[in-house]
Amino acid sequence: MKAYLTRRYMFSASHRLHSDEMTTDENQAVYGKCNNPYGHGHNYNIEVTVSGPVDRQTGMVCNLVDLDGFVHREILERFDHQNLNLLSEFAAAVPTTENLCISIYEIVKRGFKAAHLEGVRIEETMMNSFEYSGE
Amino acid sequence: MVYLTRKAEFSASHYYHNPAFTAEENARLFGKCNNPNGHGHNYTLEVTVKGAVDPQSGFVVDLKQLKEIMSREVLDALDHRFLNKEVPEFLTQIPTTENLAIAIWRRLAPKMKSAQLHRVRVYETPDLFVDVFGEEDRGKA
């Protein structure tokens, strides 16, 4: 039977929502306090869901040690305690949680081959969350 | 179609070991989960059923019946047990969260009456959970 395994991780980062293609007033109108010039931060909770048949020898969809190792190395070390606006992913894109979700999905999709990636879900705060599954 | 989810908790111990592997392979593959004396978790189970709302009762499913089925088929068998030694499925399979979710699906699915089983979710910890939807097609993944 196919199983879907979800693992949660957390990192903290700062960002400022601002688009160079809009005027100061337009940025204020669209992004509100998220446009404050010095930025602000969040504790981001990340859920990575992978799926597949359960291996008869191990009882696993994939070894959690491998998934944890990949996410720590490629995601947490890259994003934790960083200013997202300064990372290459966001040189030309506003670091909204929508775009962060897509970036993280693409990194896992490209680099983690031990199981099929179903999707990435990010909680920016307890009150809002975003999901991307490559569609 | 309406989806209804009922939660339950159980606590159990387990360890991961495949007798077909050497001691070194088991230790490498399963790490500290291979400790033969076992370790435990507080598992949270979420059972989601789906169906049309009965016009007479306003229910998708009689919650009392669902709770009884979950208690009888799952909690009575798993709660405060050493899964490897006391639960028949895990005499021959490793009691990973994946296999636990599948075993719970197979225990519950045939017992459902009015509503249809949609999803079984098992949390091993708040940071790790497995979903199964009863998809037997192994080629899709």
Image (spheres, grey):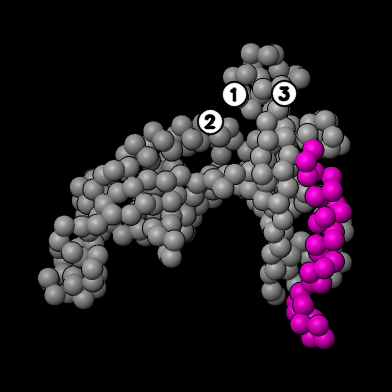
Please determine whether, in this image, residue A110 is positioned above or below residue A131.
Answer: above
Q: Choose mark 3 or mark 1, whichever is in front.
A: 3
Residue B113 percent coordinates (x, y):
87, 66
Q: Is residue B32 magenta?
A: no
Q: At numbered mark 2, what does the secondary structure look like: helix, strand or loop? A: helix
Seen at 74% across and 65% down, the residue is B49
Please determine whether, in this image, residue B5 is positioned above or below residue A115.
Answer: below
3 or 1: tag closer to the N-terminus: 1
Could you tell me the amino acid type at mark 1?
Answer: Gly
Could you tell me the amino acid type at mark 2?
Answer: Val
Is residue A120 shown left or right of residue B3? left
C-alpha separation, residue under disc 2 versus residue under disc 3 = 21 Å
Residue A83 percent coordinates (x, y):
23, 48
Could you tell me the amino acid type at mark 3?
Answer: Asn
C-alpha separation, residue under disc 2 versus residue under disc 1 = 9 Å
Residues at badges 2 and 1 in contact (C-beta under 8 Å)?
Answer: yes
Disc 2 crowd rating (10 Å Cα; few below 14, some 14-19, many 20+) is: few
User: What residue is pinned by disc 3?
Assistant: B37
Seen at 28% across and 54% down, the residue is A41
Q: Which mark is residue A65?
A: 2
Q: Which residues are magenta?
A: B52-81
In the picture, residue A81 is in which quadrant?
Answer: top left
Q: How many badges with numbers are in the image?
A: 3
Residues at badges 3 and 1 in contact (C-beta under 8 Å)?
Answer: no
Q: At numbered mark 3, what does the secondary structure look like: helix, strand or loop? A: loop
Seen at 76% across and 74% down, the residue is B60
User: What residue is pinned by disc 1?
Assistant: B31
Do discs 2 and 1 share a chain?
no
